[in-house]
Amino acid sequence: MASARNPDCVAGGIPPQRLSKEELTKTHKTHLKNQDLSPDAPRPVKQPIMAEAYPASTKSIREVEIIPLSELSVETHHRGKGIIVKVISPPYIGAGVVSIVEDEFGNADKLAIYNQGDSSILSGVPEGCIVAVKEPYYMHNGADNDYMICVDHPSDVILLRFNDPVIPESLQLGPLLKSAEEWRVAGDTAFLEKDFPTAVFCYSEALEAAGEDATAFKAPIYNKRAGTNLILGRYDAAKADSLASRTGALSDWKAYYNAGRATYGLCEYRTSREYLETALELNPNVKGIRKEYERCLARLREEEHGEYDFQAMFSSLSPQNVHLDSGSFLSRTCVRKSKHHGNGLFATHAIKAGDLVFVEKATLMPNQYEPTRASAALYALMVRQLCDNPSLADTVLKLYPGEYERTGAEGTIVDGVPVVDIFLVEGIRTKNCFSAPLSTYEDTKPEVPTGRMAKGLWPHASYLNHSCVPNTMRSFLGDVLVSRAIRDIAEGEELFQQYVPVKALNDLRNSVLKDNWGFECGCGLCEGERRSSAAMLDKRREMLAKVERACNKRPPTKGAIVPDVSIKNIERLAKQLEDLHEEEVYGDLPRLTLVYPSNWLMEAYRGRKNHAKALKHGLRVLRNFGFGVPRDAEPAKVDWDPRGMYTGSGDASLMTIHVVAALRRLAESYGVLGQKELAKRCVEAAKFGYKVVTGFSTDLSALGQ
Ligand SMILES: C[S@@+](CC[C@H](N)C(=O)[O-])C[C@H]1O[C@@H](n2cnc3c(N)ncnc32)[C@H](O)[C@@H]1O
């Protein structure tokens, strides 16, 4: 088969001709001149294309056959093979890092390494270093005779130590520095220059060069490397280094303090508390330890008792501060097999409507709210963190990856690094990530929505299966997800959430779920609506389109006066749409297609100060969301307690901010009509609903007039 991009080259075959070392170097130099290395230059992320997925290598470089560059075949994954090359150029840094490399026989080629985090020395591949690529992929690079080795999985490339016996003799340089002390000094210099990956590298060489018995020399280096790893957010390594730096002396308080900070960074607060307690015992006078210990206790209170100061958390939020210091309260829920799909989340206790179901701090959420960048930023962070903190694999890599098949070796350590398969990461990202506004509360304000959402991973919440009429609702305060019960939940009940706000027509709703998550919903509403005929669904679709067109022509915004003729028209259309809902199908089910016109009519009558009619349509909004309300009752005869609607409406109602808004309108209309008690109850019900929607109790002023 001929390569599509180079007719002379046969895919799977060795290229007849390649660029020479001189040609490669010359072009590379031109690129280097043009690269923009300013810190503000946006670094593009090469996101994986699932259709081109291939598994990461799970072999050690010592297990594969080392081949020369001249044996690389085009568009081929060289399974069971590997290359060992010396980097002979400075790096060109773009979406990946491109370098010119040379093998032991003097063959030169281009190497592109993607998906290395900033904490890795390979994100900048220094000239002179020796790297191994396991099971490399060789590809045609567009122009004639232009090829490159393309490394997508970060664990497929290894930076070799200078004296690694796997390096062929002609590439061996021997160590750049001779003594452990020289490496230590080099590490300190790199640290002072804030080149932390190089500092870690040098300290590692110092430890290696020091040999087995140099405890007194090694302990402070472990300590320094722990501190450097803490700065890099490599908490697993920081913890291991801290513990390795212990000598049995009182000065070990530093080791325990750093281990406490590292485990805090990993959100392992119980372990962190233990280390910090030991540090305090060894040295009670260091204020920093006490402070860290108090923070840790606060996290444990949140985790154990669900005690949060949500108002304070909200106040501390800013575009710069989105990662809140918060524990995760998960003890009312557990993961179990679900009859709907794979695993699901279940209530371990009875939970009352409005109460916390769980609170989860994001395992990973970049501070990137720009919609065009949010997904790529999360993907890049997931890859980086899985490389930096292998223990994350336990939570992250277990999540449902859609169709992508695991090899089972992902996350295991091979050649000193965890196997990270970028296609598995991307599969997990797409099926499990959530979009999060800076705060849901701010997002309910009636101004034009900004659409600014970060994407993040909350692994516990990911186990929730979807229902269009769920029993829980999520909201966000920065990177903290708050899940509250929409109605009373019994112990052992499966918990559901809406993956996305659902469409009114059930076929459209289900096609969104099918396209994005590969399933059709079996919730009470979807199953119920499937009993309606296709012909009726088509009629509702047509009528809804008509209603929407008519409503959009004259939106009754901010109490504007809408002419009678428009109101009558919408009333007529809404009635026709209502008549397309068979009573035997819908009964108490939500009638989502009717929400829009009833909301419109409620606002239009409010504008006309016709409160009896505004009330009638406000009640219909609630009814159309599936809540049990009096049907078109005369306001004077109503003996209704809206505060009970969350618990007394069965299990097919749908909570949204529009429910809260309608309750406020009802309160106003009841008030004007002299029904003070009902007005008060509606305000209370609205506040209650607002807490469910936003995650915490606040007044309703943010909703405007
Ligand atoms: C984030 S995962 C949810 C947890 C998943 N059940 C598991 O085993 O890890 C999302 C996937 O769960 C499945 N799923 C979620 N809700 C479902 C439902 N109501 N019915 C069938 N499958 C569902 C879909 O395959 C979807 O892509």
Image (cartoon, grey):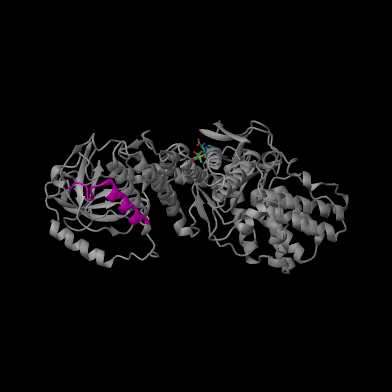
Residue 415 x/y as whole percent: 30, 38
Q: Is residue 278 above or below residue 292?
A: above
Residue at horizontal 47%, vertical 43%?
251
Q: Is residue 401 visible?
A: no
Instruction: Name the quarter where the N terminus is drawn.
Output: top left
Q: Is residue 456 above or below residue 192?
A: above
Residue 287 x/y as whole percent: 57, 50
Instruction: Name the quarter where the C terminus is drawn.
Output: bottom right
Residue 659 x/y as whole percent: 70, 52
Front in this rendered view, residue 603 or 704:
704
Q: Is residue 268 above or below residue 195?
A: above
Q: Which residues are magenta?
A: 173-191
Our reading of the magenta stretch's main secondary structure is helix
Q: Residue 288 vs residue 25: left or right?
A: right
Residue 227 x/y as whole percent: 43, 49
Q: Residue 571 vs residue 185: left or right?
A: right
Q: How many marks?
A: 0
Front in this rendered view, residue 458 or 685:
458
Q: Is residue 323 visible?
A: yes
Q: Residue 346 vs residue 650: left or right?
A: left
Q: Is residue 479 magenta?
A: no
Q: Is residue 186 magenta?
A: yes
Front in this rendered view, residue 181 or 292:
181
